[in-house]
Amino acid sequence: MPTISYFYGITIIMYPRAKEHNPPHIHAITPDCVATFDIRTGELMQGKDFPGKARKMVVTFILKYQEDLLEMWETGVYKRLEPIR
């Protein structure tokens, strides 16, 4: 499970596509919660207890790097992305 980015205590990972399912998504992990977000829409798919402030930061990250994230999902070639500030 490649770590794509880390910011404000949130780790962003993406599992290899062969082990995952559509829609394209990332996993966001905090010390207390795990959530799954759709890369195309930023929608929270799983993890309804994921904190609101952290949720907004993850959506901001997705919007900033949407093309890169979709490319990683399609190709399986992962890269580290700069954290949001």
Image (cartoon, helix red, strand yellow):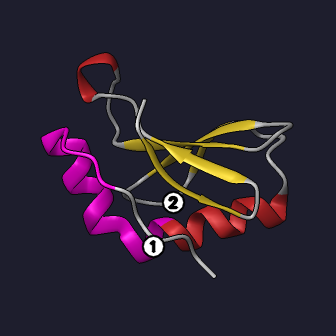
Q: Are marks 1 and 2 in contact (CB under 8 Å)?
A: yes
Give residue 58's quadrant in the image.
bottom right
Residue at 23 percent of width and 20 percent of height: 18
Looking at this view, name the residue that lies furthest to the top: 19
On screen, 69 above or below 48? below
67 in the magenta segment: yes
Check residue 63 in the rendering and tell me which mark sits there, or answer none.
1
6 in the magenta segment: no
Main SS, magenta residues:
helix
Q: Give the extent of the magenta segment.
A: 62-79
Left or right? Give the position of 47 relative to 2.
right
On screen, 5 above or below 53? above
Residue named by callout 2:
42
Looking at this view, name the residue that lies furthest to the bottom: 85
Type of amino acid at the residue the image marks with label 2: Gly
Residue 61 image offset from top left, x and y in percent: 52, 69
| Quadrant where the N terminus is found in the figure | top left
Question: Circle 2 — which element?
Answer: loop
Left or right? Give the position of 68 relative to 81.
left
Residue 26 image offset from top left, x and y in percent: 47, 44
